[in-house]
Amino acid sequence: MNPFPFRLGTTSYIIPADILPNIHYLAGKVDDIELVLFEVDDGQNNLPDRAQIAEMRSLANQHALTFTVHLPLDLRLADDESSGPNQGLSRSLEKARRVIDCTRDLDPWAYVLHLDGRSAESSPAPTRWQDQAVRSLELVGEWAGSLERLAVENLEGYPLDFHQAVLDRIAVSRTVDIGHLWLDGHDPIPYLRQALPRTRVMHIHGISGRDHQSLTHVPVEKLRAVLAELIRANYTGVLTLEIFSEDDFITSLGALQSAQAGL
């Protein structure tokens, strides 16, 4: 049984199989499953069909599961120009809409998305990038059912306040990726205290040569500090163990239990 106030989740790729077998494996072990979906430009994708979605809904009803949906990583929502009301949708917006249409019947807890801003960092007019980000988020939020269901994730390698100008203009939610903060050498606690009121999803993972590793690679006092902050704030959203193997999943659960025991 989950001892925390938040919903504990992990990704849809824990065992070496497709999404549906993973959901069968994880049902009863977690409260939420992050569907990691991709759609590449040559037409290959891992989007579930209608029968698979129906089976996912049945499993969710049986096990009190929720789903978060990670929109494709290659979206460039703020870099695309053709998103006005009288223009065709950009390629990135079309991808986002297809994923949302595919998963709408799951009533997702949130749609997690990246706002890649490499072009804004080198642009002499970053407000243009911000304007485009807001316009795109307005469209995607409409498709998702509400702006609140969109959860913009902090990314590694960016300033901590990089997305703030966009977040100040539109009432989307946030995804706080603790692993990204650790990867960049930041103490996540001050960031959490500022971000948690708008945070719908959190990602957590260890760092060992690269990110998305077992939480056994996180010193227990660092993990305990994060848990203590979530409990102090009565965070009731989703905390996703964003790892991708059965061993990392099992050992990460053990690391959480060890950290929770000292609270």
Image (cartoon, helix red, strand yellow):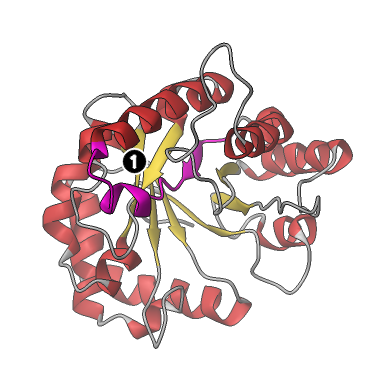
| Number of numbered labels in the structure image | 1
Rendering quarter of residue 171: top left
Q: Is residue 6 visible?
A: yes
Task: Tell me: residue 134, above or below residue 125.
Answer: above
Q: Which residue is drawn at the image coordinates 44% and 41% (left, top)?
A: 79
Rendering quarter of residue 91: top right
Q: Which residue is drawn at the image coordinates 32% and 64% (left, top)?
A: 156
Q: Residue furthest front?
A: 124
Q: Position of residue 119 (x, y in %)?
A: 36, 50
Q: Nearer the viewer, residue 195 or 91?
A: 91
Relative to 140, is 178 on the left or the right?
left
Given the image, on which type of amino acid does mark 1 rest? Arg
Q: Residue furthest bottom?
A: 209
Instruction: Write down the residue under mark 1.
Output: 174
Rendering quarter of residue 250: bottom right
Task: Tell me: residue 51, above or below residue 13.
Answer: above
Q: Is residue 263 visible?
A: no
Q: Which residue is drawn at the image coordinates 28% and 53% (left, top)?
A: 122
Relative to 76, is 196 on the left or the right?
left
Q: What kind of element bears circle 1? A: strand
Q: Which residue is drawn at the image coordinates 64% and 59% (left, top)?
A: 12
Query: Badge 1: how crowded within 10 Å, few (<14), some, or many (20+)?
Result: many
Residue 158 falls inside the magenta stretch: no
Quadrant of the image containing the C terminus: bottom left
Q: Position of residue 256 (x, y in %)?
A: 37, 70
Q: Nearer the viewer, residue 75 or 51?
A: 75
Relative to 70, is 14 on the left or the right?
right
Q: Residue furthest right?
A: 51
Q: Position of residue 80 (x, y in %)?
A: 50, 36
Q: Position of residue 40 (x, y in %)?
A: 71, 54
Residue 119 falls inside the magenta stretch: yes
The magenta segment is 108-126
